[in-house]
């Protein structure tokens, strides 16, 4: 049955918050919970269905609303990249710290954690091979890449992450970024001027 994806591009600095629903089970995850409003809670529906808050990296525009979700949804689990713990002093503690290769099960959907440092030291992506989608946070955007002039950022590391971890995925994989519109691996390999 696959997944359905709703994007809310209303967060601080135009950050994209995503609501992902496993259609077989109805279980949901919010990816990069920087935005919280009635729009999102209405789409979540039954409080029991929200299983995870998933964070791609430790910048405040992506975790700004974690406390709001945790207050409203008592059983939701917050999962964040372990290697970004040092820059997340303003963020609630994660219920589980993630590292490369970890697998997250949402009903029948499985997301693999792919480590993509560069924008931050602990940046990660969430990849569903069966659905051919990847949530890249601020690693890769349509015809752009994440900035590397902030704490723990590194340009060479970012380019290596994109080339070795993302550009090796199937060309028809859809990329959902932390800012801006969706794209595909094939398009970025062909048209992204930064890599």
Image (cartoon, rainbow, N blue to C red):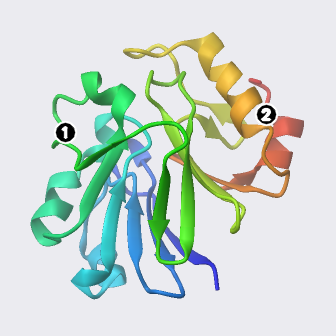
- The disc at residue 188 is none
Tell which of 118 and 11 is nearer to you: 118
Label 1: which residue?
91
Q: Quadrant of the N terminus?
A: bottom right
Who's the residue at 32% across and 70% down the image? 51
Label 2: which residue?
192
Can residue 154 be seen here? The reply is yes
Who's the residue at 33% across and 63% down the image? 52
Tell which of 154 and 95 is nearer to you: 95
Relative placement, left or right, of 185 versus 165 is: right
First of labels 1, 2 by sequence position: 1
Residue 157, compared with residue 128, is above or below; it is: above
- Residue 57 placed where, x, y %? 40, 36
Q: Quadrant of the C terminus?
A: top right
Relative placement, left or right, of 177 versus 107 is: right
- Residue 15 placed where, x, y %? 42, 48
The Cα–Cα distance between marks 1 and 2, rounded to whole angstroms, is 32 Å
Residue 74, compared with residue 151, is above or below; it is: below
Categorize mark 2 by other alpha carbons within 10 Å: few (<14), some (14-19), many (20+).
some
Which residue of the protein is positioned furthest toward the right in this rendering?
190
Tell which of 187 and 97 is nearer to you: 97
Tell which of 152 and 178 is nearer to you: 152
Can residue 137 be seen here? The reply is no
């Amino acid at each position: 049955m696959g997944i359905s994806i709703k994007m809310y591009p209303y967060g601080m600095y135009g950050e994209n918050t995503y609501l992902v629903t496993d259609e077989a089970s109805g279980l949901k995850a919010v990816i990069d919970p920087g935005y919280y409003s009635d729009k999102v809670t209405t789409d979540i529906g039954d409080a029991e269905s929200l299983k995870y808050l998933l964070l791609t990296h430790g910048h405040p525009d992506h975790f700004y609303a974690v406390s709001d979700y945790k207050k409203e949804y008592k059983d939701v689990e917050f999962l964040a990249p372990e290697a970004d713990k040092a820059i997340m002093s303003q963020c609630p503690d994660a219920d589980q710290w993630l590292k490369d290769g970890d697998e997250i099960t949402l009903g029948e959907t499985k997301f693999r954690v792919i480590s993509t440092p560069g924008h931050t030291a602990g940046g990660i992506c969430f990849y569903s091979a069966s659905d051919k989608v990847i949530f890249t946070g601020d690693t890769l955007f349509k015809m752009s890449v994440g900035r590397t002039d902030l704490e723990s950022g590194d340009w060479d590391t970012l380019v290596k992450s994109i080339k070795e971890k993302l550009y090796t995925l199937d060309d028809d994989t859809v990329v959902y970024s932390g800012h801006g519109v969706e794209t595909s691996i094939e398009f970025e390999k062909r048209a992204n001027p930064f890599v």
